Amino acid sequence: MTMQLSAAAVQARLKRVSVIDIARGVALVAMAIYHLAWDLEFFGYSPPGTTAFGYWKLFARSIASSFLFLVGVSLVLAQANGIRWNRYWRRLAMVAVAAAVITVATWFAMPDTFIFFGILHQITLASVLGLAFLRLPPLLTLAIAVLVIAAPQFLRSDAFNHPALWWIGLSTVIPRSNDFVPLFPWFGAVLVGIGTAGLALKAGLFDRLATVQAGAWSRPLIFFGRHSLAFYLIHQPVLISLVWVFAQFFPAQVETREVTFLSSCQRSCEQSRDTEFCARYCACVLDDLQKDDAFDRVYAGEQSPALKARVGTSTEMCSASADSGMLNGEVQ
């Protein structure tokens, strides 16, 4: 199949489809809101783990999915009338350099959780791999997207546990990183965008979208959408700087490590179990880890196999203990 735009759509494409810029702008604003929430948590203004679980976690995944979906759509539109290689390589180089800058900056700022394969790294790789799907039938691309998204549920293996292979997304361990967007399953969102855009081209949808003129309210969103890379690189340093300045005058209340651990553990546990179980379970884990230096090592972010085995033993024992206590009706 060859994707060709009509003459009117080609002219409209040169003017850009503003609806797509608006969608990208909305995603950028949503990302800024999430990062502000993360910054507030980082400085202690909200409980630990707030942005890692529940609705905030769903919000973050929705933002990443929308960005990658739009990458697929934009890739189809940009190459629909033939690949303009100079423009393609220039844009790819800009995103790759920006990804490298993020890695280096976070390595110095937060070495234990630096971003080694985040959203920009995924966009860089997807922009290359996506070229192979531009001429496939859209329905086939969508079918492959389903397989890519489902792959981590079935193909995880210890063979991918070497750090050099973490970017694939099929390891049995979850790397510590402030933004981890591996090939599987996230490339699937790009393929969904490619497949959807292919169907939209065949249906003439972009011809109609190109004629849509939004009101003045959309101008900031269009501006952000057309300068998405600059927005991405600038907004977080600005936000975290503002929160830091605020913290100098109105510092957050400092909680003990034990309170912080229990709060984070409880929030994580309650994603799958009830409050009573989680209260018993988390108190048990904390008490058990404090019997030696394990708690200090966990709090320091140690990732050694020996410590992981120690924590695994503790969590299994405490899970069984909490279940047993609830069955026996013990009063906490």
Image (spheres, rainbow, N blue to C red):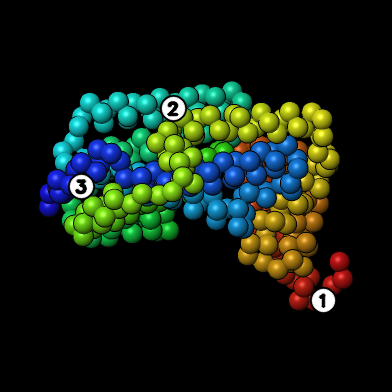
Along the polypeptide, which appears first: circle 3 or circle 1?
A: 3
Q: Amino acid at mark 3?
A: Ala
Mark 2–mark 1 Cα distance, whole angstroms, equals 56 Å
Q: Nearer the viewer, mark 2 or mark 1?
A: 2
Front position in the image: 113 or 22:
22
Task: Left or right? Give the position of 247 relative to 37.
Answer: right
Q: Nearer the viewer, mark 3 or mark 2?
A: 3
Q: Amino acid at mark 1?
A: Gly
Q: Please state the horizontal and vertical placement of residue 323, each as a whole percent of the image.
A: 72, 70
Is residue 54 among the parts visible in the rendering? yes
Q: Which residue is mark 3?
A: 9
Q: Please state the horizontal and vertical placement of residue 119, each as a whole percent of the image.
A: 45, 39
Q: Which residue is mark 1?
A: 329
Determine whether 93 is above or below 178 in the image. above
Task: Identify the mark at residue 98; answer none if there is no mark.
Answer: 2
Answer whether labels 3 and 2 touch (C-beta < 8 Å).
no
